[in-house]
Amino acid sequence: MKITVTKTAVDWFKREMDAKPGEAIRFFARLGGCSTVQSGFSLGMAKESPRTAGISTTEDGITFFMEEEDVWYLNGGNLIVDYDQETDELKFVST
């Protein structure tokens, strides 16, 4: 399992969440919502430091991660975080 964050998605995090090098963005499972990854759940995001990261990647000095307790959300797959210019929103794909 791994996380891939595209360059356009990293730019979105810098712009919308004021993410800077040295900071970290956590992805976590939330009950409810709409997701292309896991039915009945959605993916939340927060700026915080990892405690027990299950998977992580660093792009432009920003760490993106999921804690061990949330990696079940990916069903053993990979998470791709991309940016959709038409909707000006992030999109999440599991592969």
Image (cartoon, rainbow, N blue to C red):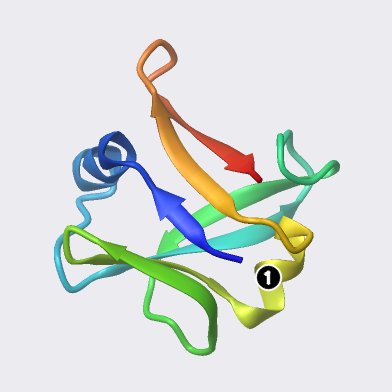
Question: Where does residue 92 sit, x and y in percent of width and height?
Answer: 56, 39
Residue at horizontal 68%, vertical 59%? 29
Give the answer, above or below, for where 91 lies relative to 32: above
User: Which is more toward the observer, 4 or 64?
Assistant: 4
> Label 1 belongs to which residue?
70
Q: Secondary structure at mark 1?
A: helix
Q: In the image, 46: left or right of 66?
A: left
Give the answer, above or below, for where 44 lies relative to 61: above
Callout 1 crowding tier (Cα within 10 Å): few <14, some 14–19, many ≥20: some
Q: In the image, 73: left or right of 22?
A: right
Q: In the image, 15: left or right of 27?
A: left
Question: Where does residue 19 sit, x and y in percent of width and height?
Answer: 22, 56
Question: Where does residue 70 sit, x and y in percent of width and height?
Answer: 68, 70
User: Which is more toward the observer, 40 or 68?
Assistant: 68
Q: In the image, 35: left or right of 12?
A: right
**Quarter containing the N terminus:** bottom right
Residue lying furthest top:
86
Residue at horizontal 85%, vertical 43%? 40
**Quarter containing the C terminus:** top right
